[in-house]
């Protein structure tokens, strides 16, 4: 079944006058905003998607180390070569990463042929600040949310036509948040706010008057085994898209399936994801704001052992990076380690461990079915999973089931 790249190649010869703007078009624009535009699309300057592609060919001739960025680059080049996307003006590119404030925010605006604007928010990149901000959302308002609102209101003030906005991953969350918190004058001009496997919004936002004004114009899409899009925040109504990938890899927008120019939709999430979502929701709701802060800070104290402003080492040298983080984990003070074990033990007790095994089974079964996979592949992976759970929780899952005590006792 075709994916987003195939969609662009099949329908790219049709202009937006010939084929109206659709959700796959929105997803395509949320992938283009991931491209680095520093030095090209400065404030007050407009470039086209085709010009962006030519710029990337000069500045990044060897593409990117990040596999997902490589896929987005291919998609951007395909969009640039199409009549549908190639001539779209790109305006007001803004990118700010501030490690001191633990924030990462990036957005740009596309001018559409109908006189409207599409505000695209970038999702989390590989910066440590960006990932820290994602987790900070579980217990506090974060700077990117305020930036998203101000960016949308500035875009609305710059012209008088209709607005669309969207994003992938954290960009999807920012799209929902900005739509719900923008001034009523800007909200009135929003045609659609799209979220693609983005975290939901906090309960206070869902209950607010701003969200009530725009909720009928929100479209949220997640893959059938969504993990990222179901984390941290309360999620609004969503549609489930079929993905060709498994587990966490379904977060990749280029794995989403498209049929006859529209997303291939399913009736709901798969069983493993529903179990995981329920376990995570109960676990997060049971943690105090101080516990969430402590968990987040501890995770990033361990990640700081990479001595990098980005998570690139995890991509380029996983083995060495894992050893560094394991060393940092062992250096945590006993009280912090005990608290982390207790919290993770509670998560396991709620059933997340079983849900993870169910999700992993789909991956290992597919690998085992491959003629190049060893016959004992599944069993070895299962042993590694149990060993990891034992290290995290502090004892074997069988011991927890048999001794009748809670993980925190």
Image (cartoon, grey):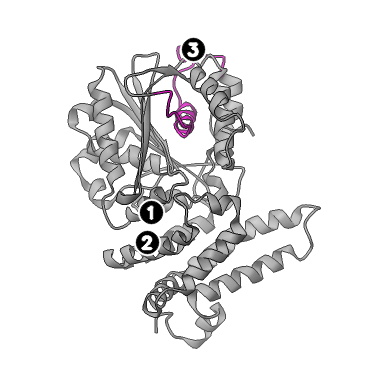
Contact (Cβ within 8 Å) of mark 2 with mark 1: yes
Which residue lies under the disc numbered 1? 132
Q: Which residue is under mark 3?
A: 18
Q: CA distance from mark 1 to mark 3?
A: 43 Å
Q: Tell me, yes or no, if residue 259 can be seen here.
A: no
Picture layout, residue 223 above or below residue 165: below
Quadrant (top left, top right, bottom left, bottom right) of the C terminus: bottom left
For the N terminus, the image quarter is top right
* Label 2 residue SS: helix
Q: Which residues are magenta?
A: 12-41
Q: Main secondary structure of the magenta part?
A: loop
Single out the residue that lies furthest toward the front. 307
Q: Nearer the viewer, mark 3 or mark 2?
A: 2
How many other residues sit within 10 Å of disc 2, few (<14), some (14-19) or many (≥20)? some
Whichever of labels 1 and 3 marks the residue nearer the N terminus, that label is 3
Quarter of the image for residue 116 reads top left
Instruction: Describe the element under mark 3 as helix, strand or loop.
Output: loop
Within the magenta stretch, is there residue 365?
no
Snapshot quadrant of residue 164: top left
- Estimate the x, y position of residue 45 in percent, counting from the top left: 36, 18
- The quarter of the picture where residue 384 lies is bottom right
Residue 38, position in %: x, y? 42, 29
Mark 1 neighbour density, 10 Å: few (under 14) some (14–19) many (20 or more): some
> Label for residue 296?
2
Earlier-in-chain disc, 3 versus 2:
3
Residue at 62% from the left image edge and 31% from the top image edge: 2
């Amino acid at each position: 079944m075709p994916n987003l790249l195939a969609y662009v190649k099949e329908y790219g010869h049709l202009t937006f006058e010939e084929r109206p703007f659709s959700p796959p078009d929105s997803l395509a624009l949320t992938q283009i905003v991931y491209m680095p535009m520093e030095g090209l699309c400065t404030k007050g300057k407009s470039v086209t998607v085709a010009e962006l592609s030519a710029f990337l060919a000069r500045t990044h001739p060897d593409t990117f180390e990040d596999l997902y960025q490589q896929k987005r680059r291919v998609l951007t080049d395909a969009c640039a070569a199409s009549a549908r996307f190639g001539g779209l003006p790109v305006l007001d590119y803004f990118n700010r990463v501030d490690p001191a404030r633990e924030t990462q925010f990036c957005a740009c605006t596309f001018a559409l042929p109908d006189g409207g604007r599409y505000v695209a928010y970038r999702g989390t990149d590989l910066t440590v600040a960006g990932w820290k901000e994602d987790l900070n959302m579980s217990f506090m308002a974060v700077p990117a949310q305020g930036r998203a609102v101000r960016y949308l209101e500035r875009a609305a003030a710059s012209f008088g036509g209709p607005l669309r906005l969207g994003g992938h991953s954290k960009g999807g969350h920012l799209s929902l948040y900005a739509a719900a918190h923008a001034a009523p004058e800007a909200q009135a001009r929003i045609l659609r706010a799209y979220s693609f496997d983005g975290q939901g919004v906090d309960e206070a936002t869902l209950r607010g008057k701003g969200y009530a004004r725009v909720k009928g114009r929100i479209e949220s899409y997640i893959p059938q085994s969504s993990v990222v899009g179901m984390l941290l925040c309360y999620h609004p109504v969503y549609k489930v898209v079929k993905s060709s990938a498994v587990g966490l890899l379904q977060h990749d927008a280029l794995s989403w399936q498209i049929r006859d120019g529209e997303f291939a939709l399913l009736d709901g999430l798969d069983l493993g994801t529903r179990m995981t979502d329920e376990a995570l929701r109960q676990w997060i709701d049971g943690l105090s704001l101080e516990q969430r802060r402590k968990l987040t800070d501890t995770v990033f104290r361990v990640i700081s052992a990479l001595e990098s402003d980005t998570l690139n080492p995890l991509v380029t040298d996983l083995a060495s990076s894992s050893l560094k983080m394991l060393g940092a984990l062992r250096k945590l003070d006993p009280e912090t380690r005990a608290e982390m074990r207790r919290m993770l033990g509670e998560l396991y007790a709620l059933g997340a461990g079983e849900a993870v095994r169910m999700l992993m089974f789909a991956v290992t079964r597919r690998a085992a079915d491959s003629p190049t996979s060893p016959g004992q592949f599944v069993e070895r992976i299962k042993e590694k999973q149990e060993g990891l759970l034992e290290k995290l929780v502090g004892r074997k899952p069988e011991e927890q089931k048999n001794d009748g005590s809670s993980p925190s006792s």
